Amino acid sequence: MTKPHPPISAPSVMGRHLLAFSLVAGSLLVADSLAIHQSPFRTSSSRGGARYGRRRSPSGRLEKDNVHLSIPSLLMASSQSQTPSDDDNDIIDAVNLDHDTSIQNTSHSPTKNAEEEVISIWPQMDDLDKRMMKIALPCIANFAINPLVGAVDLFWVNRMGNALAVAGQSAANQVFSSAFWIVSVLPSVTATLVSKANASGNQEDLQDAVCQALLVGFGISLVGTALMLLYPEKILSAVLKPGSPALQYAKPYLFIRAFAFLPSLVSLIGFSAFRGTLDTSTPLKISATSNIFNAILDPILMFTLAMGVPGAALATLGAEIISASSFFVLMLKCKMIRWSKLLRLPSWSQLKPLLEGGAALQLRNVSLNLTFLAVARVTQSLDDTGVAAAAHALAIQVFQLGGVVLLALSVVAQTVVPNELIEKVDATTGKRTGGKRAAKNVVNRLMSWGFILGVGLGALQLLLLPVLRKSSPLEEVRQAAVIPSILGSVYQIMNGLVFIGEGVMVGCGNFMQLSLSTVVATIAALISLKTLPNMFGLTGVWMSFGVFNIFRLGGVWLHQTRIGPLSEKALAAS
């Protein structure tokens, strides 16, 4: 049974006021987010943006074709493409180290004059849309795999017919994920460093970036695994109350998952390395193969061998080992890493870019995971039967299945915007492309896609809700998950704008603004979690999710209309 709601006190009144303010602000921001799309600019790029090509470098550039390998295996974790700069000049340096005045044109379509071209803010299925789709589709497939596998794990744990088993597995999985992602800034920086080295044709720097990330990741993984093995109850206390009945399932699951810290980090670094060389198909093949392996092992270990929840953890660990091994072998084959560099301690000057870039992203990661841990802890405290936690786990799967598409578009923004910011001269025609005006057009188009896809995905999730609810055989869990699942579907509209808007912040190099926006949103979410669940139970937890995303949307709005480098004020000044 869910705890009875206490009388409304002063804090509860504050919670009601915060909720009312957030709902009004959210409505205004969603409406005004379309005002983020300024009237179409006359862009300095051809329709669909600049056309990019890759020049063959005599210094040994690692060409894209060198890393298109059809090898099976592996689980990748979600990726973030970052630029290490804090202003537009640094972005230009990061992407175009050659400081060249010309870019090889590999497109055969004619380019219009910069003063004649007008780009619509809405999707047109033109060259710009096609270019974004080419980047987005492999990312969507990659991001979709993880929540789908999570849904498979949840399905089989639900088949046990034990709400406490679901609650324990969900709690341990949340703790592992939060601990892992707090230190997972390394792969984000690695992708940028690899991209810079690959663009300049410097294979030595490329190897240095990957090998240094693996070395630092090895040290972090040892510490993370040791802490989880030595202090499981203290770590799980971030989510579960001391003496919680779900601990009997959470502890063995976390014990096994602790050994996955290193292979998970190796997989993520490997994914970032391949993505830095513009190869997204190889990670997709590895991720799909390893997770198929996980899905096959789940029922065998859990039921045929009667291992229960620990069997689910072993299946996941096996998939992650396959993934890490595959990436490692392929990186050796593609000469992204060398044994001599892996066995040699790097100098401070070599480590400095990696560590400084990671530190710049750490504040945001900590804030995000603080929010998710607080949500998990409040959910676990709602009752002692595990029904609320099981219903939350079911609803979060619905939420994530739609969010992967929008998260992929965020990665597109992180990749396309910094490239579009660079003014380039076509070596064949002599015409200029790119620049801030062109980047603004790209941002407007991306935000429109985010809004349209957010509405579409939210509607699709509502239609599929009866099917998704059948993953639990417990009627009380299915009933408790209805309203949270509906709220999660509605939130996809905001997610479409938030994810892409934050990707634009990363692409512009505004890391501190992004971090501060996330911190403010986290504070608002924590205040909501103190009040709304007391009034509305599990629904109040999901209302707090809404407050969190509304404040993040506010940060996006400020960046794109007031204080960002692509705001009207900044563009007029330039």
Image (cartoon, rainbow, N blue to C red):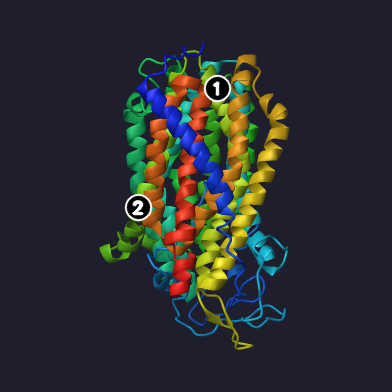
> Three-letter amino acid code at disc 1?
Ala
Pick the residue in front: 548 or 480: 548
Q: Does any portion of residue 72 appear in the rendered image?
A: no
Q: Does any portion of residue 428 appear in the rendered image?
A: yes
Which numbered tag is attached to residue 522? Answer: none
> Three-letter amino acid code at disc 2?
Val
Sooner in the amino-acid sequence: mark 1 or mark 2: 2
Q: Quadrant of residue 49?
A: bottom right
Pick the residue in front: 83 or 268: 83
Q: Which residue matches tag 1? A: 390
Q: Quadrant of residue 374?
A: top left
User: Mark 1, mark 2: which one is toward the viewer?
Assistant: 1
* Count of all numbered marks drawn on residues in the image: 2
Q: Position of residue 443 (x, y in %)?
A: 56, 62
Q: Position of residue 14 (x, y in %)?
A: 39, 28
Quarter occupied by the C terminus: bottom left
Q: Position of residue 54 (x, y in %)?
A: 58, 76
Which numbered tag is attached to residue 216? Answer: 2
Q: Residue at x 56, y 81 (%)?
A: 103
Q: Position of residue 525 (x, y in %)?
A: 42, 35
Q: Residue at x 48, y 50 (%)?
A: 268
Q: Quadrant of residue 151?
A: top right
How far apart, in angstroms, are the residues tagged by discs 1 and 2?
36 Å
Question: For numbered disc 1, what is the local secondary structure?
Answer: helix
- In the rendered image, the residue lying farthest to the left is 348
Q: Work out whether 221 lies above or below 390.
A: below
Question: For numbered disc 2, what is the local secondary structure?
Answer: helix
Q: Residue at x 59, y 35 (%)?
A: 488
Q: Work out whether 113 lies above or below 179.
A: below
Pick the residue in front: 494 or 75: 494
